[in-house]
Image (cartoon, rainbow, N blue to C red):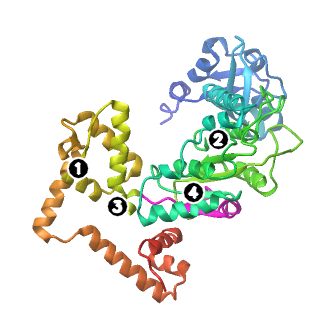
């Protein structure tokens, strides 16, 4: 066992870690440097050993180096964003965690784990710069054409009760400035709905900006959202954030439950008093931004998993919109299929006239875990492979042919009864009975049925259950 954890073996293992790892002694001299750190700083490992940390990072100082801070204070520093110039003059941005190493109560060094986010930061800042340029000094016509919100309620395809209900609620919500929380599985069309709300509001001629909160590390996301000031942290520059760019318009924060909890506190402040503070800045700035947030997990689940703060949730869900899964509105599938056929006819310069009854029947029976987005990809794939002017069963992915075989087997064994109809009838009966048992208390009924409250509310609307 001791041989496995020998110094040499541990160094080999650490060389295959994807993060940069450095270790310094109490005087700040580098005693270990893994391969990823060497690649990050564009230096040979052998050239770093024994040299002082500030020789390799001349743009840092004893006060700004997180490694030296850990040595000096004896306290760990976690997930700290740092931008520095290495000894070759290259600007690098990392997320660092620096931890002091102690032995018998004495600090004997410090270890730092660094994740390189240079490319992500540069791309994110370029996007912010482009958006700032886009929205600055544009007239009304140009702003509307280039705001990024291209969808309206007419782009929400469907005539099912579920989709008509959500359109009606969203149209009413568009007339106010209240925050909105949107929940829907991946692929249900949450951003399409959000853009439609923006374009139906009195903010339609102002900025619409979308940011996925899961796409960036928390430390970088804070600067992108709130902006930065020169000197706020090492390498920081004066730069507006998305809140300032969206002033007067709408900011869409997707996967809000992926935002770090400490950053959710700052978002709550914006919702409460309409002010922001750039990273590293003392003064506050007033902004007028409508915030629409979305999550692809049920809000109650995010709350239970402590991914979403309760106070933020209660502030966001002044209006809560539940985007139904495609399987909950199967009657819309024919409309969606023909919409996508028209779309890809235009893109592929084809003249597909429709879909066979057998193929369409199978599409309506399928469960669609990927929702509308999956249906779109299926139609796109079929139009790449099909022969003739009609999508047939043979044009669809192989899983649909298996579905046909399974359905045929069920019909032979069970007659002509629809499994889907039978399941829905049983579900409706169970819900109605539980509602009666619980005197129509939705929360108690949801507990009895062991389903989320929002799911129960959706099912009540779906089956048009009334007291």
Q: Along the polypeptide, which appears first: circle 2 or circle 3?
A: 2
| Residue found at the far front of this picture | 141
Residue occupying image coordinates x 26% and y 42%: 353
Q: Is residue 328 above or below residue 293?
A: below
C-alpha separation, residue under disc 2 versus residue under disc 3: 33 Å
- Report x, y in % for residue 61: 83, 23
Q: Is residue 322 above or below residue 109?
A: below
Q: Residue 213 falls in which quadrant of the image?
A: top right
As drawn, the label of residue 400 is 1
Neighbour tally class for label 1: few under 14, some 14-19, many 20 plus, Cα within 10 Å = some
Which segment did they paint magenta? 302-325
- Disc 1 is placed on an element classified as helix
- Report x, y in % for residue 295: 56, 54
Give the label, 4 or 3, closer to the camera.
3
Q: Nearer the viewer, residue 53 or 187?
A: 187
Neighbour tally class for label 2: few under 14, some 14-19, many 20 plus, Cα within 10 Å = many
As drawn, the label of residue 331 is 3
Reading the image, the residue beneath label 2 is 209
């Amino acid at each position: 066992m001791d041989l496995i954890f020998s110094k040499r073996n541990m160094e080999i293992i650490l060389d295959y870690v994807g993060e940069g790892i450095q270790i310094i002694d109490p005087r700040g001299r580098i005693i270990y440097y893994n391969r990823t750190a060497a690649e990050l700083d564009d230096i040979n490992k052998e050239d770093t050993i024994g040299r002082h940390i500030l020789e390799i990072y001349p743009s840092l100082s004893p006060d700004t180096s997180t490694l030296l801070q850990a040595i000096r204070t004896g306290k760990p520093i976690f997930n700290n964003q740092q931008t520095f110039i290495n000894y070759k003059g290259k600007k690098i941005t990392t997320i660092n965690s620096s931890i002091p190493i102690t032995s018998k109560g004495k600090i004997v060094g410090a270890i730092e784990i660094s994740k390189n986010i240079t490319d992500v930061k540069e791309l994110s800042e370029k996007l912010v710069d482009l958006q700032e340029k886009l929205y600055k000094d544009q007239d009304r016509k140009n702003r509307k054409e280039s705001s990024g919100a291209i969808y309206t309620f007419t782009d929400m395809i469907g005539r099912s009760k579920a989709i008509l209900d959500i359109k009606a609620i969203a149209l009413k919500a568009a007339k106010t400035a209240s925050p909105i929380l949107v929940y829907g599985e991946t692929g249900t069309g949450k951003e399409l709905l959000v853009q439609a709300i923006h374009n139906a509001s009195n903010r339609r001629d102002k900025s619409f900006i979308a940011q996925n909160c899961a796409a960036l590390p928390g430390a970088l996301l804070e600067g992108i959202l709130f902006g930065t000031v020169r000197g706020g942290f090492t390498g920081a520059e004066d730069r507006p954030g998305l809140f300032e760019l969206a002033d007067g318009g709408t900011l869409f924060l997707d996967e809000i439950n992926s935002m770090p909890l400490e950053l959710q506190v700052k978002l709550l402040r914006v919702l409460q008093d309409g002010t922001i503070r750039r990273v590293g800045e003392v003064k506050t700035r007033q902004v007028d931004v409508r915030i629409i947030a979305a999550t692809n997990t049920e809000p109650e689940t995010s709350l239970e998993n402590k991914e979403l703060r309760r106070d933020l949730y209660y502030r966001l869900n002044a209006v809560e919109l539940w985007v139904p899964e495609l399987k909950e509105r199967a009657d819309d599938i024919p409309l969606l299929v023909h919409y996508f056929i028209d779309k890809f006819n235009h893109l592929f310069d084809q003249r597909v006239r429709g879909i066979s009854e057998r193929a369409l029947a199978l599409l309506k029976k399928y469960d669609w875990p990927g929702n509308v987005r999956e249906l779109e990809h299926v139609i796109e794939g079929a139009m790449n492979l099909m022969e003739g002017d009609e999508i047939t069963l043979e044009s669809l992915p192989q899983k649909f042919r298996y579905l046909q075989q399974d359905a045929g087997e069920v019909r032979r064994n069970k007659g002509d009864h629809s499994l889907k109809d039978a399941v829905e009838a049983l579900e409706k009966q169970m819900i109605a009975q539980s509602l009666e048992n619980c005197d129509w208390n939705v929360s108690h009924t949801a507990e009895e049925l062991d389903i989320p409250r929002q799911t129960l509310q959706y099912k009540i609307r779906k089956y048009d259950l009334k007291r």
